[in-house]
Amino acid sequence: MNIQSKSIDLEFEMPSVDELRVKFGPHLAEMESLRRLPNALVQQLETIGVFRMLAPRQFGGLELAFPTALELIRRISIVDGSIGWIAAINSGACLVLPRLPRSALGEIYSNGADQIVAGSAQALGIARRVPGGWHVSGRWPFASGCTAANWIIAGFKDAEPGADEKPTTKQMLLRSDRYTIEDTWKVLGLRGTGSHHVSITDAFVADAFVMTLGPGELSVDAPLYRHPAHLIALGHGAVHLGIAQAAVADVVALQRERSSDAPGRRDLIDYELGKCHGRLKAAQAVFNLQVNSNWSDATNNIPAKPVTLGNTVQTLVQIAAETLDIVRTCFEIAGSAAIYDESPLQRRLRDIQVATQHGLVQRANWVAGGKALLEEDGSASLNNSFFSALATG
């Protein structure tokens, strides 16, 4: 961490989990019902600084050291997985914005650094080149936080490449009111994320708001923006770890409320709970090692390599599997008390199950780890085109 980052981090007051629980607790039931974050909760996240924590300092952002931002995401996820997911996704999108020209950044942050940026990682749009920009049409799923977003990122391909050219994949940024939000987020878990489909038809996108995710110059050159794929990916791990820690704490609280258990059952609970706690600590330790390694590369301006992203994703796939099993075990040993809608453990199980369905942490991505070990060029084949494109950015 450089001296400037230390200075900024010291100015940021990291809220405790108890403080976050007081702020967010009254909104959890409404959030599940609305299938998005209530406006009052979004405002609380703004007050804490979630949406500006990764924005550039020169545009009013906090530009926190990434380990600090991840710790905040983890703490928020202990309170609720949906809120943690929004904190990770809608702040992490800021990391790719310096691939746009400074003129675009000036417009994006013209109303302040608390810009909520949603988006979809899939390049499902089709575009035609026109003078000064592109005409784009498309429909994209999983636009987490889109109902509260100021801006939405989406990917597209050139519908009319040259005869000797392959279709190029690009990302565009448009104000959220240019998109139609389709009410599709009716799901098992992470209900509060409002991850609906979004669509546009023949929308003009100026060149200044179109970016290529591969190598290129940055309009803001700072550690946060040099290796966006590696850092954005780590946000998933922080959410998973927070949910798992909350599940362990839920079982501890439940057991302390119970007057007695049969000796055999109590021994089983003690054993499984101790095992879950040990596995959680190990997963957190591995995560911390990967975070420190990736952040060191960014701060020391070491060029990004696909092999590094392969190693990062390998770590996250393992953490996803571990935390999913930890939460499932906690739900099981909690017994019938966990099956009710008002049980936080039931919500943790639903949330972690959906979180671990994300393409980035699917077991298919073990392939990337294997290729990183076996192939001389260290290439990484990921089950996610967005992160693959960013791997050498």
Image: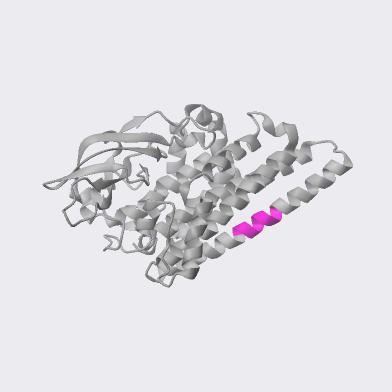
Tell me: 345 left or right of 141. right
Task: Give the residues drawn in magenta, as a range.
Answer: 277-284
Q: Is residue 175 magenta?
A: no
The structure residue drawn at horizontal position 68% and vertical position 31%, both measured from the top left corner, is 339
**As displayed, is residue 180 above or below residue 10?**
above
Residue 278 painted magenta: yes
Where residue 63 sits, quadrant-wise, is bottom left
Q: Residue 5 at what x, y percent from top left?
A: 43, 63
Where in the figure is residue 342, as x and y percent of width and height?
A: 64, 29
Which residue occupies the foreground of this view, 294 or 107? 294
Numbered-mark total: 0
Q: Is residue 41 above or below residue 1?
A: above
Please report the residue visible at 70 percent of the width from the left and 53 percent of the height from the top. 277
Give the left or right position of residue 255, taking residue 177 as reference.
right
- Give the residue at x 49% y 55%: 365
Q: Position of residue 137 (x, y in %)?
A: 25, 38
Quadrant position of the C terminus in the picture: bottom left
Q: Taking 175 as reference, is 74 left or right?
A: right
Residue sitting farthest toward the left: 131
Q: Residue furthest front?
A: 163
Residue 270 percent coordinates (x, y): 79, 48
Q: Is residue 31 above or below residue 380?
A: above
Question: Magenta stretch mostly in which secondary structure?
Answer: helix
| Residue 72 visible (yes or no) | no
Residue 58 seen in render: yes
Kindly indicate the quadrant of the structure image that contains residue 24. top right
34 or 349: nearer the eye? Answer: 349
